Image (cartoon, grey):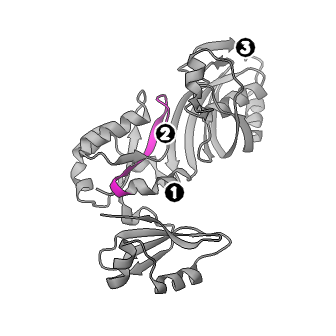
Amino acid sequence: MNGLLLIDKPQGITSHDVVARVRKILQIQSVGHSGTLDPLATGLMILLVGEATKISALMIEKNKKYALKARLGETTDTLDRSGQITEKKETDHLQEKEVRQAIQMFQGELDLPIPAFSAKKVDGQKLYDKARAGESFPLPLKKMTFQDLSEVQMKLPDFELALQCTSGSFIRSWVHELGKKLHVGAHLLELQRTEVGHFQLKNAVTLEQLADRRDLIAQETASPFFIPLSQALGHLIRIYVDGREEFLVRNGSIPHRVKLELISRVDADRPMPVQLMSKNSERLLALVELEKEIGFHLRRVFQY
């Protein structure tokens, strides 16, 4: 079992819980994920099964799209509805036009504080451990990019919208800072991840549905919710090898002919990993990367 598994995460469980349940359903320990969702959040999680765990960095880098619902006028300690309300302000004076304008202005690259209740580590300690212990500490800033804000619906003091953001962005922080911009505070009510790169929630399965469709994954049969490793990185250049070249790749070497083809096909100014594929089995054998002062080297070799 080697590939990407699209799961529709339910509310109320952690990303670690999802991985644990999938390990039990598939009866395989080699399962990871390409980006956490808070217990409050629902939606698309891309799980990496078997040798696909070796491409986690490539999956984590992808932009994400979310649908969210937030409430103006109330601030919580966790920046979402799971926390305690720390401040309330009147919102009767707010007009839809004013809120819409603030939302549209509040996009692009922003330096926002990381939530105190998050798994981000500072000095080797997770922030939520410090926050739960009642410690007071400055929140580190992080560059986050928010764009494609759309489908804005108003029923003040609540509003809903869809947006896209870079990997590692905190939607809670965006909502909180928007509330500050409007001088009333705000917190996140609901969050659903709808896209990761070109992968979409509509193709995902629930944990219950997965248990009924396990046979497809066991056969590594392509389906809307399971993408075999050989098809997982369709946006990257492919170079096919067979015979002795395949033997060399499997044992950690780049054949001379492959190096020549890499030189001709890879943009040195914007290098991307290249897939080395088996001509016979169509399986992904390795990823090659170009690094300055090192040249081409095998970033990952897949054994399956």
| First in residue order: circle 3 vs circle 1 | 1
Q: Magenta stretch containing residue 52, yes or no?
A: no
Visible residue check, residue 160: no
Instruction: Locate residue 10: give its quadrant.
Output: top left
Q: Amino acid at mark 2?
A: Thr
Instruction: Point out which mark residue 58 bears.
Output: 1
| First in residue order: circle 1 vs circle 2 | 2
Instruction: Locate residue 228: give its quadrant.
Output: bottom left
- Distance between the Cα atoms at labels 1 and 2? 15 Å
Dividing the image into 4 quarters, which one contains the C terminus? bottom left
- Distance between the Cα atoms at labels 3 and 1? 43 Å
Q: Name the foreground residue: 253 vs 302.
A: 253
Residue indicated by mark 3: 89
Q: Is residue 191 above or below residue 287?
A: above
Residue indicated by mark 2: 36
Q: Position of residue 279 (x, y in %)?
A: 34, 79
Q: Is residue 60 above or below residue 161?
A: below
Q: Position of residue 191 (x, y in %)?
A: 53, 33
Q: Residues within 10 Å of mark 3 (few under 14, many from 20)?
A: few
Span of residues in magenta: 37-51
Q: Residues within 10 Å of mark 2 (few under 14, many from 20)?
A: some
Q: Position of residue 28 (x, y in %)?
A: 27, 47
Residue at 28% over, 44% down: 210
- Dot 2: element: loop
Query: From the viewer's perspective, is 47 left or right of 264?
Result: left
Q: Amino acid at mark 3?
A: Lys
Q: Position of residue 253 (x, y in %)?
A: 43, 75
- Dot 1: element: helix
